Amino acid sequence: MKNLLYILTFIITTAAIAQNATTLDIEKQQLKQALAYGDNAVAAASMYAIINIEGPQSTYKDSLAYLYFNARNYSSCFLVTNDILKNNSNNLELLEMQAISLESLGAYGKAVEVYETLLTKTNNNYHAYKLAGLQLALNKFEAANSSIKKADQLPDDGKVEVTFQVNKNYNENVNLKSAIAYVEGIIALNLKKNAEAKLSFERAIKLFPNFVLAKGKLEALNAIKE
């Protein structure tokens, strides 16, 4: 009797494994097709099905986070990255996606926390720049000043550009070093340090001669009577 139960259990287990394998192959094929056709809804559904079959450690959780991020579904992206990072806190790409998601959702305080964590791991000047910008938005001017000065001191590879909105019809892209100098000037203005602000705006223009916003700020400062 025991042998019969063992055989029956073995048959059921084998059948279940085979069924899962077949279902997994079908879902992966459907996912591939959905991505090829740009159908994010079907792609997400397939990813969820694959994750349910493979379990909590499925690498398709990462894929789901990227899918949501690229679709600018920042609330879902945050939830997925938050789940993954509980067990893999050193995934820098997911950390950055989480920070961007929080910023995009207007959760600046939480975004600051993630960028602070990210900066300790990367020592990257762009991450320090983003941290300073968020602290500035929160009116934490002294903290922002420390972050932007750190950004200015860190190495720059010359590859990153930052977009500023000049008006509703025009954006300008400037190199990161110039953007850092500009934000340093804005922070100095908020700290009532006009002389330092002027120097920062002058440096921003020197690094990027066509920097419209920096020129405007400098002209406004020069127009102030001492």
Image (cartoon, rainbow, N blue to C red):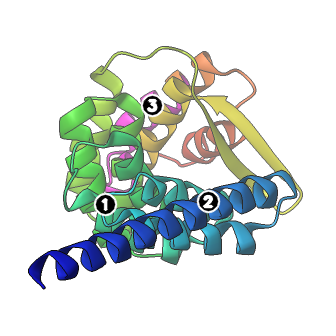
Q: Earlier in the sequence, mark 2 or mark 1?
A: 2
Give the residue type that dot 2 points to.
Answer: Leu
Judged left or right of residue 173, residue 37 is: right
User: Is 201 rendered above or below residue 106?
Assistant: above
Residue ID for mark 1: 84
User: Is 81 rendered above or below residue 213?
Assistant: below
**How crowded is the residue under tag 1: few (<14 C-alpha within 10 Å), some, or many (20+)?**
many
Going 23% across and 42% down the picture, which residue do you hit? Answer: 90
Quadrant of the image containing the N terminus:
bottom left
Q: Is residue 65 visible?
A: yes
The verdict on residue 133 being magenta is no
Q: Residue 209: x and y, percent?
A: 70, 21
Judged left or right of residue 174, residue 18 is: left
Q: Earlier in the sequence, mark 1 or mark 3?
A: 1
**Label 3 to label 2, Cα distance in Å?**
39 Å
Going 72% across and 35% down the picture, which residue do you hit? Answer: 173
Going 52% across and 47% down the picture, which residue do you hit? Answer: 225
- Helix, strand or loop at disc 3? helix
Q: Residue 115: x and y, percent?
A: 30, 51
Q: Earlier in the sequence, mark 3 or mark 2?
A: 2
**Label 2 to label 1, Cα distance in Å?**
14 Å
Judged left or right of residue 59, residue 117 is: left
Going 21% across and 35% down the picture, which residue do you hit? Answer: 121
Q: Quadrant of residue 216?
A: top right
Eye-nearest disc, 1 or 3: 1
Give the residue type that dot 3 points to.
Answer: Ser
Q: Which stretch appears magenta?
A: 187-202
Residue ID for mark 3: 200
**How crowded is the residue under tag 2: few (<14 C-alpha within 10 Å), some, or many (20+)?**
many
- Helix, strand or loop at disc 2? helix
- Helix, strand or loop at disc 1? helix
